[in-house]
Amino acid sequence: MTTTDDRLGSAPEPSGPVSRIDYGERIPNNVQLSTDRRLQRALEGWQPKFLDWWRTLGPALPTRDVYLRTAVAVDRDGWAQYDFVPMQDYRWGIFLSEAVPDRRVNFGQHKGEPAWQSVPGEYRSDLQRLIVVQGDTEPASVEQQRHLGGTAPSLYDLRNLFQVNVEEGRHLWAMVYLLQAYFGRDGRDEAEELLRRNSGDHDNPRILGAFNEDTTDWLQFFMFTYFTDRDGKYQLGTLKESGFDPLARTCEFMLREEAHHMFVGTTGVQRVVERTAQLMVEHDTEDVLPHGGIPLAIVQKYLNLQFSLSLDLFGAELSTNAAGYFTAGLKGRWAEGRRKDDHVLIGATRELTKVVDGRLVVETVPLLNALNLDLRDEYRADCETGVKRWNRVLSDAGLQHRLRLPHEGFNRRIGVYAGSHVGPDGEVLDEAGWTARVGDWLPGPQDRAAVASLMRPEYEPGRFAGWLAPPAHGINDLAVEFDYVRFWRQDNA
Ligand code: BYC
Ligand code: FE
Ligand code: FE
């Protein structure tokens, strides 16, 4: 499988028999849906609404069929099968990782108790909220990416976009299954709402900030899949630890699909940087735009934007919600099982940086209240790995320029930095100072117009737009030149 992400895969090997997915059903699943008529009817009632949503707000570019992977079993090797599928016929379904026999809650006040197979009454609304927030992001991203197909730089990239889109659609199914199976009437109502809120909708927006922003172009898309899908990896990683076993198993399987989304981002940005570096060397200039490349300064601005938007997705640094979720056993830490502490955290502390009187100060806070920050630190460290990789391209080309992650306080709207202005180097600025510099740090209309001027579709097999390098390998060991997406053509019957 094409993954570069070796930090995934911390999940235990499934120990039970590996269940095949039943594709004879209207809704493919490995949860024995046919034995629960009520649930089956509820989900079959939701299915046409989902398909309607996909048709109106899913990928706008008409295609005949796309070389996609579909899950066939949930074990480590057998879960991905590749074939041409008309996208609207993709078999969205419900797949949970294998149950771990005798699984226990492994953190918080219920540590050591058997994991829950149904929702504990006292945690019902918190759990429902976590599932709704997670579920809301999945269709939001499809909506954000709806128009990108029209400017795809190659069939290979177009196929990757669609793969990501169908899987985000499946992630919505995953959360809707939990809502309908375990949360009764409220759950069914929330499942409807997940299709009713829309990204960027003035009256009915998606829940989290980053999911209402425009994905304006392919550079933004690559940054999104690098930084924002990676937030997904970390949030799912904490929900995979949940004491509510069906949620844990669902998230574990979603994580496996998520690796490809981040691969698209890592390699996408890398290919942009490769092409830019090449043009910089060839023409001995930073201004590669006239030569059809994206200047590094613009790449850095897009990076700054998507990284800071993604940091906001972790919520406030100090969060009693997060403390409550942890203590209740609903949402753990990243790699909870590998942490060498008591997994209860009463009395534990950590450091937190914030702005006081125009300066950054460090204070000590209870760790339990700073779990969003704990997760964000793990995330940031992971984000650095891709930046290193991109910088290696620059150094290999003999260039001095480097990309970097901005300071954690840069451009923040949620948490301790909201209301202050912090530059990429951690310099605290007043309003005037920020306004004077922000155009150097975040993409403005000119930068977006420059990138937009390069976004022309390239649908010939094996051809790539001039602003990025071709990938090193094709999908599933096929050639880079393979026709990964096929269109309806009026001229050949
Ligand atoms: N925007 O205590 P606080 C993915 C609200 S990405 C707007 O600081 P808490 C994907 C918050 O709701 C992963 N509002 O934080 C990627 C709360 O409101 P109430 C998505 C925000 O509760 C790419 C208040 O502020 N998954 O899968 O710990 C493509 C105070 O909250 C924001 C999840 O997020 C924000 N950024 O919330 C496709 C996992 N941040 O209650 C998919 C589930 C905070 O006062 N969600 N607020 O009305 C959670 O674990 C948590 O709810 C949060 C942090 C991470 C959102
Ligand atoms: Fe997802
Ligand atoms: Fe994703």
Image: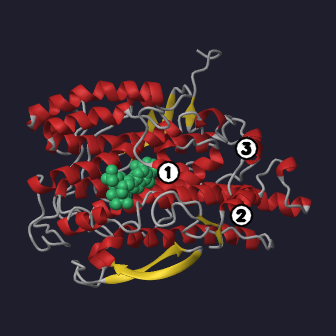
Q: In this rendering, would 335 be left or right of 67?
A: left
Pick whichever of labels 2 and 3 is earlier in the sequence. Answer: 2
- The quadrant holding residue 151 is top right
- SS type, badge 2: helix
Which numbered disc, 1 or 3, marks the residue closer to the eye?
Answer: 3
Q: Quadrant of residue 109?
A: bottom left
Camera-side residue of 235 and 272: 235
Can residue 255 be seen at all in this image of the molecule? no
What x and y, as percent, mark residue 366?
A: 32, 79
Relative to 224, residue 9 above or below: below
Disc 1: which residue: 476
Disc 3 packing (10 Å; few <14; some 14–19; many ≥20): few
Image position of 71 with respect to 270: above or below:
above
In this view, the residue in front, 17 or 225, is 225
Q: Is residue 278 above or below residue 158?
A: below
Q: Quadrant of residue 427?
A: bottom right
Left or right position of 376 against 281: left
Asked whether disc 1 touches disc 3, contact meaning CB atoms under 8 Å apart, the reply is no
Q: Which mark is residue 433?
A: 2
Q: Residue at x 34, y 30 (%)?
A: 50
Three-letter amino acid code of the residue under disc 2? Gly
Q: CA distance from mark 1 to mark 2?
A: 50 Å
Element type where label 3 sits in the image:
helix
